[in-house]
Image (cartoon, rainbow, N blue to C red):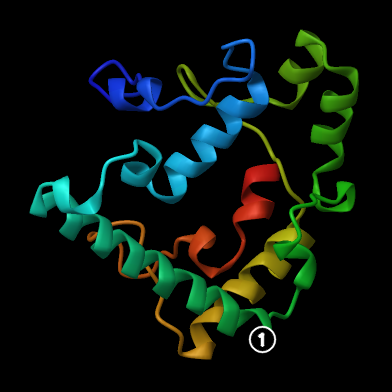
Amino acid sequence: TDDMGAMLMPFYRAMPRNEQDACTLRLTLQAIRCFLEDPFTSWKLPAERLPEKFQRALEVHRKINAERLEIIRKYRSRVVHPDLFEGKVKEEWLDPAFCKAMKNNTPSAWREILHEEMDGVYSFKLVTEAFCDMFLEEVFNFYKSGLPAKRPNSMNAYGIVLNDIGMEPFIDEL
């Protein structure tokens, strides 16, 4: 994307059109999917015309993604709580007061669950203690597996990127 967050012009030039010369929602989504899979091919740019820097970067990202998918595949048979990998948040995992606020969905219902930690800083309980125990059990199980764990940043020796162990559907839903 450019500095404003918009797609670059080659993306728009390569957009498929239907028989009425229109870019439909379906065609746009297909173009986005193709772009995410292989941006330069989706732009109809032959690999030999790409600067070497782009070719190397694309290859590095392909390798990283292949490694990530391999870790997810290997861990899949070792999970303790398969529900955490399915992309469905169970109501029993959510704090009852949060569920009530969500169902009522009024400003007063949301205000009821907020706690002011300090001036202008608020918190609320989202999940139950039982969920926290289950979630931590799964994270520690991953650590015990011996599979490589990607850290969120270089300053974090103990964190883990949950998407990289297969929890992406669940995290997206949450």
| Residue at (30% x, 26% y) in the render | 10
Residue 174 appears in view = no
Please tell me in which quadrant of the rendered image residue 52 appears. bottom left
x, y percent for residue 150: 37, 68
Kind of residue sitting beneath label 1 = Arg
Using residue 46 as the reference point, say whether residue 125 is left or right of it.
right
Please tell me in which quadrant of the rendered image residue 73 appears. bottom right
| Residue at (33% x, 69% y) in the render | 63
Q: Quadrant of the C terminus?
A: top right
Q: How many marks?
A: 1
Q: Quadrant of the N terminus?
A: top left
Using residue 151 as the reference point, say whether residue 36 is left or right of it.
right
Q: Nearer the viewer, residue 83 or 40?
A: 40
Using residue 19 as the reference point, say whether residue 156 is left or right of it.
left
| Residue at (89% x, 52% y) in the render | 92
Query: Residue pushed farthest left?
Result: 52
Say which residue label 1 marks: 78
x, y percent for residue 115: 63, 27
Instruction: Give the answer, above or below, for where 143 lies relative to 120.
Output: below
Residue 8 appears in view = yes
Identify the secondary structure beneath mark 1. loop
x, y percent for residue 162: 52, 61
x, y percent for residue 23: 57, 16
Instruction: Give the answer, above or below, for where 107 lies relative to 171.
Output: above
| Residue at (49% x, 78% y) in the render | 70
Q: Nearer the viewer, residue 27 or 104?
A: 27
Q: Could you classify mark 1 by the number of other residues whose Cα lies within 10 Å: few (under 14), some (14-19), or many (20 or more)?
A: few
Using residue 43 as the reference point, say whether residue 131 is left or right of it.
right
Q: Nearer the viewer, residue 85 or 128?
A: 85
Query: Residue pushed farthest front?
Result: 19
